[in-house]
């Protein structure tokens, strides 16, 4: 059996999308944060969401993508204010368990986790999490491969559709994506616990042989 020894915290962020002097996209400021705390048994304990006021304009492209406008965030707190609310929520939800032992999870750890760390650094706030992170996208790719599915379409929405996950909200809003990502992780873990993944034809592809 697969066992976890700590809680998991699924993080999803939306950000501004400016550009540097070379024309490369910069994601300098978080505008939306969604988080789902999962127990060691991968049960959802609690969720957190908040818009954040950035220190640069939200582009039309980002507004079209996320449906978050400059007007929606103009009276919201900057990152330090939301971070305090976020930490209060997490401490209460953990009920005495250590934040340092929580493992961050994201859909591809190349965007959300570095952006979160960058935000802490930019505002001079101590980063409270450990350096390790869990990549849900990689787990989803493994699930697709073991069940005979194509691995070239791994957007959150595409994977959720394959898994028949009901979506409550709009994609590219942080809390919607975070909750769906948490449910994807639950599904992968459940199938692996059974030592098989079932494909569309109902064929069981055994990926791991139990010791018993």
Image (cartoon, grey):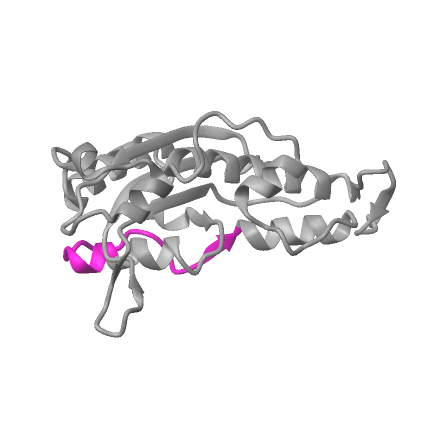
Residue 165: quarter of image: top right
Q: Residue at x 50, y 53 (%)?
A: 134
Left or right of 93? Residue 161 is: right
Q: Position of residue 79 (x, y in %)?
A: 18, 45
From the image, which quarter does the C terminus lie in?
A: top right
Q: Nearer the viewer, residue 101 or 165?
A: 165
Q: Which of the pair 34/101 is nearer the observer?
A: 34
Picture mark count: 0
The image quarter containing residue 158 is: top right
47 or 193, which lies in front?
47
Residue shown at the point (57%, 26%) measured from the top left: 166
Whether residue 31 is visible, yes or no, is: yes
Q: Is residue 95 visible?
A: no
User: What quarter of the picture does the N terminus occupy?
Assistant: top right
x, y (%) of residue 44?
Answer: 49, 30
User: Is 111 left or right of 68, judged from the image as shown?
Assistant: right
Residue 8 location (% of width, % of height) = 47, 43
Confirm whether the magenta stretch covers residue 153: no
The reply, left or right, for residue 140 in relation to residue 35 is right
The residue closer to the viewer here, 205 or 89, is 205
Vertical placement of residue 201 versus 44, above or below? below
Q: Quadrant of residue 163?
A: top right
Magenta region: which residues? Answer: 119-135
- Residue 67 x/y as whole percent: 32, 35
Name the residue: 49% across, 55% down. 108
User: Residue 121: within the magenta?
Assistant: yes
Question: Which residue is found at the position 79% from the left and 51% from the top?
Answer: 208
* Residue 56 versus residue 196 in the image, above or below: below
């Amino acid at each position: 059996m697969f066992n976890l020894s700590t809680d998991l915290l699924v993080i999803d962020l939306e950000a501004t999308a400016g550009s540097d002097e070379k024309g490369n996209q910069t994601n300098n400021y978080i505008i939306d944060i969604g988080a789902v705390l999962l127990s060691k048994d991968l049960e959802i304990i609690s969720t957190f969401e908040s818009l954040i006021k950035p220190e640069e304009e939200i582009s039309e492209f980002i507004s079209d993508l996320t449906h978050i406008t400059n007007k929606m965030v103009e009276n919201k707190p900057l990152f330090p204010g939301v971070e305090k609310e976020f930490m209060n929520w997490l401490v209460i939800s953990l009920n005495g368990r250590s934040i340092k032992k929580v493992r961050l999870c994201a859909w591809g750890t190349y965007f959300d986790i570095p952006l979160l760390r960058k935000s802490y650094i930019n505002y001079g706030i101590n980063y409270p999490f450990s350096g390790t992170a869990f990549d849900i996208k990689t787990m989803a790719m493994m699930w697709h491969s073991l069940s005979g599915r194509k691995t070239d379409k791994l957007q959150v929405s595409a994977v959720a559709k394959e898994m028949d996950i009901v979506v409550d909200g709009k994609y590219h809003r942080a809390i919607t994506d975070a909750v769906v990502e948490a449910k994807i992780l639950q599904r992968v873990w459940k199938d692996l616990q059974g030592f098989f993944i079932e494909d569309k034809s109902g064929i069981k592809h055994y990926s791991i042989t139990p010791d018993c």
